[in-house]
Image (cartoon, grey):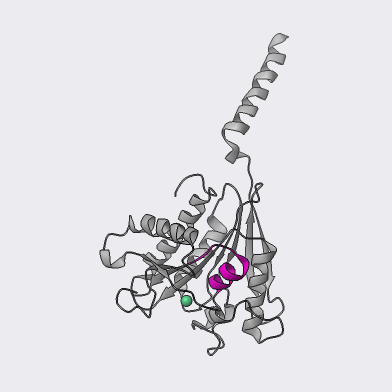
Amino acid sequence: MISVKKHFRIIFVALLLLFFCFPQTVLLQTTSIEYICAGTNFETPVYIIKTDYKEPTIMIVAGTHGNEKAGVKATEYLKDNLHIEKGTLIIIPRANILACEENLRCFPTEINLNRVYPGNPQGNSVEKLAYEIFNLMKKYNISLLVDLHESRQFYRVNPNNYGQTVVIDSNDDYLFELSSFLVEEMNKEIIEDGNKYQVLVDPIKGSTTYCAHHQLGIPAITFETCKKLPLSFRIEEHLRFIKLVLFKWNMLAVQK
Ligand SMILES: [Zn+2]
């Protein structure tokens, strides 16, 4: 008789131990989709991956420029394959979806989405798109914005291009320390010196990160790979960069 009661007690204690020692086994993440510019040609999905612990909220934007594929491919992979331990991750894989479909930097070609922030709800279609992305940052009260880009040339070869850099929009101590840390960690795995990353302080008015940082006070960083490197390598680099950021914010249990 005592054994039945005792067994139940043992099972109960074991379950409690499991819950406290391995919380990841019981934490669930859910992914929901909302759309920006819904009902227009620029309608594009936003993936919101939530856990039981809402904070921090990190937003990752790719496809601001449609011919910069590595960030688009990396985020499209992650939206289906990433398991976070805590926080909220917001992913926009194809910010300018028409530019992505046309494989063009900008669509329409004369309007650069990365120069029209914070956008304008009464403006042209690209200004409306910027306005909706800007509103998402506010709505979710994000802790960090990461904007993924690619450049046709290495910064070290031609400083007009930003290939292999992490760009920040001000000399703010926190941003500088954060980007320096990320560059240092990324460079540990880069064998060829010429492919190593460097921090670049370059305020670009009207860009996603400039607007997030200067208007909303959100830490914001741009990650740029160089298109001279193979696409498969660049996709891996974007994945590695995103995971590094998530690890630093304790959203991943182990550095994968
Ligand atoms: Zn770009």
Q: Which residues are magenta?
A: 208-221
Q: Position of residue 39 (x, y in %)?
A: 72, 78
Locate residue 142: give its quadrant.
bottom right
Residue placed most toward the observer, 72 or 186:
186
Dominant secondary structure of the magenta stretch? helix
Residue placed most toward the observer, 143 or 246:
143
Q: Residue at x 57, y 35 (%)?
A: 22
Number of numbered markers: 0
Figure check: 252 above or below 172:
above
Magenta stretch: residue 48 in it?
Answer: no
Q: Residue at x 49, y 82 (%)?
A: 105
Q: Position of residue 76 (x, y in %)?
A: 53, 65
Q: From this viewpoint, which residue is outermost toward the bottom?
A: 110
Q: Position of residue 42 (x, y in %)?
A: 64, 80
Whether residue 25 appears in this view of the structure is yes
Residue placed most toward the observer, 185 or 202:
202
